Amino acid sequence: MAGVEEADKLKQLGNAAFSERKWHLAIDMYTKAIELTKTPTLFCNRALAELRAELPGAALADADAALGIEPTFAKAYYHKASAYLSLGKHKQALTNYKKVVDLAPQNSDAQAKVEFCKKEIRRINFENAIMTPDEAPLSQTIKLGSVRADYDGPRIENETVTVEFVEAMKEHFRLEKLIDRHDVIFILLEVQKILKKCPNFVSINVPVGEEITVCGDTHGQYYDLLNIFKLNGNPLETNRYLFNGDFVDRGSYSFENIMTLFAYKVLYPDHFFLSRGNHEGVSMNRMYGFEGEVTQKYNSEMFRLFTEVFNSLPIGHIINNEVFVVHGGLYSSDKVTLDDLQHPNRFRDIPESGLICESLWSDPQPMPGRAPSKRGVSCLSFGPDVTETFLNNNNLKLLVRSHEVKDEGYEIEHGGKCITVFRLLVLFFIFSLFWLSSGLC
């Protein structure tokens, strides 16, 4: 009885953490409660927290555990369906949402999700049916068109992106106004030209006595981006930035966020850097909002053009031959070299396995070795020994990655050799050594 009471207290702590959006703390509390008593409610609570923390693989396992205790627990089927949906597996999601409707016919949300999954399956089947392998990329056929007669916002003059234009565009966005379609397409085509010339992993040289700021996931938080620039200075040739993926989805201003970053890349191609994240891909954009946002603000053709540009983004960066920066993390083999990482074809949607997938999806873990990813993809979690081996084999000193929310804005792991940066991290180079400072915005 005492164990049940303690489990209930832990459950309440988990619920409180969840209400404060502290997903990982909630998971920890539910885990401790489950160690005392295993109930379908606890497994489902943990599954929901795992979904919020983007761990659909773990959520699937917990939903199945709940169903193992109570096979007709509708909430478990709902979380299982949601996990499949977040992975872009619409058919499996549909099967489980239908089960929810069978068990709880009055669940209008599940009914709506059934219809959504059916619609998505039809759309995907249609797109696959009309797809022609030899079709020219949209970037080669799209027309800039003319500027709207009633448009009174900032303009790109003489086909040149200037500091003045970027600053005016940022203010225009701050006032929740859009720029003309002509200039959006121009920036996308210009940045694509720059990105396509980059290798998979770009080498960055930061001179002695200078610094580079590495920023983690910004996820459509445009006003947070403005705050970063307010606190740390606007990008300049002497004020370098590297944004490490996940520029879009979730936030309501993903378009404004990514357009600002792309404009700065065009303005400072050799001093402003962008890495691809796992959210710079079609399935995530459809699930987490970017496709809908761009389609609503412009049209579906514009989203297709964004997809082409995302497929051109580099996978990672190497700073001063010392710091390896990638969105997700490391690999399923200890033999991976920097040269190996330059070979895969990145000019495509994010693959479901292989070096590019692992670069964008993997996560560190405290225990040695490797383990299956809790995210439900064909990737892994990697331990401190994996980090040590990779860095030693490639004559590197530090791994910097993003991909996970950290309450303090960053987290240092693996004996100081792996840093997860969620907001921003400043690397200051002195005589081939680097000093770290961090800021939370």
Image (spheres, rainbow, N blue to C red):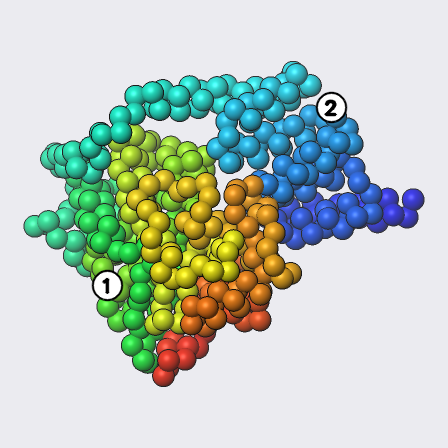
Judge the density around disc 1: few (<14), some (14-19), many (≥20) Cα neighbours within 10 Å.
few
Residue on which the image places disc 1: 270
| Residue kind at label 1, given as amino acid type | Asp
Query: Camera-side residue: 92 or 72?
Result: 92
| Circle number at residue 72 | 2
Please name the residue shown 55% across and 50% down the image: 380
Q: Is residue 92 visible?
A: yes
- Which element type, helix, strand or loop, lies under badge 1? loop
Q: Is residue 266 left or right of residue 206?
A: left
| Circle number at residue 38 | none
**Vertical arrangement, residue 1 with respect to residue 382, above or below:** above
**Vertical arrangement, residue 88 with respect to residue 364, above or below:** above
Judge the density around disc 2: few (<14), some (14-19), many (≥20) Cα neighbours within 10 Å.
some
Please name the residue shown 16% across and 53% down the image: 161
Q: Is residue 10 left or right of residue 289?
A: right
Q: Is residue 244 left or right of residue 155?
A: right
Which quadrant of the figure contains the C terminus?
bottom left
Quarter of the image where one finds residue 408: bottom right
Q: Is residue 367 left or right of residue 214?
A: right
Residue 29 position in % (x across, y down): 72, 50
Query: Camera-side residue: 174 or 355?
Result: 355
Whether pointer 1 and pointer 2 mark residues with C-beta atoms closer than 8 Å, the reply is no
Residue 397 position in % (x across, y down): 45, 72
Please name the residue shown 29% across and 71% down the image: 205
Q: CA distance from mark 1 to mark 2?
A: 58 Å
| Residue kind at label 2, given as amino acid type | Thr
Q: Is residue 298 visible?
A: no
Please name the residue shown 55% across and 27% down the image: 93
**Vertical arrangement, residue 406 with respect to residue 177, above or below:** below
Which quadrant of the figure contains the N terminus?
top right
- Which element type, helix, strand or loop, lies under badge 2? loop
Earlier residue among tags 1 and 2: 2
